[in-house]
């Protein structure tokens, strides 16, 4: 039996964004006023024919009205309520679902306030421990890089204006991977009066690009590959030729200060550069044809592993979406320096990511692609891959850096990836139970737990000892939609999957 779909909150939000009253909306949809009011008040479910009318009237993808569209927000709320300092009794999945369905803006504001609370609390504790003087105060706003990251996440990591502008420019210049540098040099010289030079002597050892506005000269490191040089020129081109588009995006971002705006401008310029080197429609078609084979995409577009993974996480154009991915970059200390997500995957906001997540093991096997089926405490499952990348070097004393790149999608999309071939995606024993971070993770029997969850009453029994450092009462299991693939309740220990050629060793707790 099909589930009835109610879209009242989404319909009201779209109507208000368009500046329409209910009468005007009814006229636009060709429906009666009473029926339109019933739809908006969730008194009537939406039908397939009305969905088509909504899609045409608001020029949006039908999937935006689907029940799973707010799944990421629901997942964040479920993780949030694991923090016992928020509420004595956490609402169940049904109550959270109703909250998201009927008041999505309020739910999003609640999550944002909680994240700000965590940041302020952490900053306060750091100040106390460092004995700051009386004249120094704890910052009361998110750090600039956090604010910029949240801006891109709110946009689902897709910036339509810049993406389409980059695609149009790539078509006009007829850019060919492997031979893009010459065309970009000519574009900068003819249209903007900028000369391009490749000279390592005038750059600092760690510099990749330097723009001299007075001399109208752009200097780029000659040690970079064709794709890297093209990326640097495209970044500068975004700031020169598409500055108005970038500024329009910044005006709508609601950023607090100039530092945040400067970082966001840099990020938007990088976004344009990636979209220019990997034009949307061409990249999406190639990704689908190769079944999202990252190495094949590297060869086709002459870019690096990280660039391909980051671009895959941005393929979310309405009506032309690819597989929705999360993308993450982690250093060897476990710090997450980049994270974007078009999925409900919940990243740790502080305290480090889950040590059972295979992205950490990538450092032990550099250069190899590791795969993992991960299950979150709410029962949602994700298929992910991870690999290390290294940049810099070229000399014994030259600076270099190494990261692990993680890319993943919900298990329902995994069959579209070549990396899932030969893996039984429905086998519960293949899933590794991970969490959003020790601070809010509800799993009671994790031998890798670094510290107990906030607000939990610890069980202390000096008469016994085990691998589990902190024991506490387990929460009742939280369930989500039935299409998650089944399996044992969240938190129940599982047998580790066997190691394979491209499988991560299962760093996980034993019963």
Image: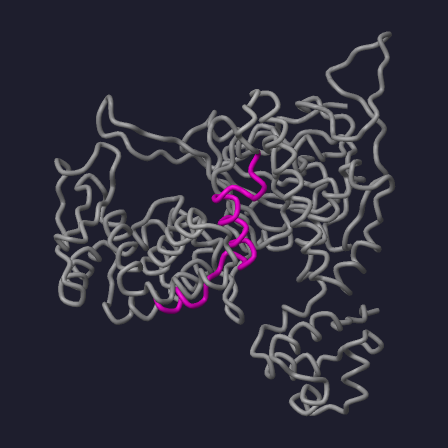
Start-end of magenta stretch: 138-165
Q: Name the magenta segment's main secondary structure.
A: helix
| Residue at far front of view | 135
> What x and y, as percent, mark residue 384?
56, 43
327 lies above or below 25: above
Give the residue displayed 68% in from the left and 56% down from the top: 108
The colour mode here is: one colour
9 lies above or below 219: below
Give the residue displayed 72% in from the left and 53% down from the top: 74
Residue 259 horizontal side relative to residue 87, left or right: left
Residue 264 horizontal side relative to residue 218, left or right: right
The question of residue 161 being in magenta is answered with: yes
Q: In front here: 120 or 148?
A: 120
| Residue at far top of view | 463
**Dividing the picture into quarters, in which one does residue 31 lie?**
bottom right
Q: In front here: 181 or 101?
A: 101
Quarter holding the C terminus? top right
> What x and y, as percent, mark residue 83?
76, 37
Residue 182 horizontal side relative to residue 375, left or right: left
Quarter holding the N terminus? bottom right
Q: In front here: 214 or 132?
A: 132
Give the residue displayed 48% in from the left and 60% down from the top: 158
**Dividing the picture into quarters, in which one does residue 445 lie?**
top right
> What x and y, as percent, mark residue 159?
46, 62
The question of residue 145 being in magenta is answered with: yes
Q: In front here: 18 or 387?
A: 18
> What x and y, as percent, mark residue 228?
27, 47
């Amino acid at each position: 039996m099909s589930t009835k779909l109610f879209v009242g909150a989404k319909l009201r939000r779209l109507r208000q964004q368009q500046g329409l009253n209910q009468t005007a909306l009814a006229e636009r949809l060709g429906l009666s006023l009473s029926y339109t009011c019933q739809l908006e008040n969730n008194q009537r479910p939406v039908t397939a024919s009305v969905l088509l009318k909504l899609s045409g009237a608001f020029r949006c993808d039908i999937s935006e009205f689907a029940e799973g569209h707010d799944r990421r927000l629901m997942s964040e709320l479920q993780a949030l309520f694991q923090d016992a300092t928020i509420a004595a009794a956490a609402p169940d999945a049904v109550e959270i679902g109703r909250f998201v369905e009927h008041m999505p803006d309020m739910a999003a504001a609640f999550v944002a306030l909680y994240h700000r609370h965590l940041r302020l609390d952490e900053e306060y504790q750091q100040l106390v421990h460092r004995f700051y003087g009386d004249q120094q105060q704890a910052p009361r706003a998110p750090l600039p890089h956090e604010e910029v990251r949240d801006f891109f996440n709110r946009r689902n990591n897709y910036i339509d204006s810049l993406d389409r502008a980059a695609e149009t420019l790539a078509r006009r210049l007829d850019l060919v991977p492997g031979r893009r540098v010459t065309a970009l040099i000519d574009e900068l010289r003819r249209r903007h009066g900028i000369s391009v030079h490749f000279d390592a002597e005038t750059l600092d050892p760690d510099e990749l690009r330097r723009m001299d506005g007075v001399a109208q000269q752009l200097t780029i490191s000659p040690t970079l590959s064709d794709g890297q040089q093209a990326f640097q020129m495209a970044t500068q081109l975004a700031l020169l030729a598409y500055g108005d588009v970038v500024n329009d995006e910044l005006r709508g971002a609601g950023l607090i200060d100039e530092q945040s705006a400067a970082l966001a401008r840099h990020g938007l310029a990088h976004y344009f550069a990636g979209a220019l080197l990997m034009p949307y429609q061409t990249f999406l078609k190639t990704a689908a044809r190769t079944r999202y084979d990252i190495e094949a995409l590297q060869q086709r577009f002459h870019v690096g592993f990280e660039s391909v993974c980051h671009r895959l996480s941005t393929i979310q154009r309405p009506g032309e979406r690819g597989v929705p991915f999360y993308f993450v970059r982690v250093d060897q200390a476990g710090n997450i320096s980049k994270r974007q997500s078009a999925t409900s995957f919940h990243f740790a906001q502080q305290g480090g990511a889950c040590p059972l997540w295979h992205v950490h093991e990538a450092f032990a096997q550099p250069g190899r692609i590791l795969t993992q089926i991960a299950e979150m405490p709410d029962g949602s499952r994700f298929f992910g891959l991870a690999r290390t990348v290294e940049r810099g070097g070229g000399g014994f004393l030259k600076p270099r850096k190494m990261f692990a790149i993680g890319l993943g999608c919900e298990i329902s999309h995994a069959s579209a990836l070549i990396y899932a071939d030969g893996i039984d995606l429905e086998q519960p024993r293949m899933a590794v139970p991970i969490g959003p971070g020790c601070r809010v993770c509800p799993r009671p029997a994790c031998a890798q737990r670094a510290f107990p969850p906030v607000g939990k009453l610890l069980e202390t029994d000096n008469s016994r000892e085990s691998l589990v450092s902190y024991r506490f009462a387990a929460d009742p299991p939280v369930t989500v939609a039935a299409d998650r693939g089944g399996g044992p309740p969240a938190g129940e220990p599982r047998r580790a999957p066997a190691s394979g050629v491209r499988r991560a060793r299962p760093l996980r707790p034993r019963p």
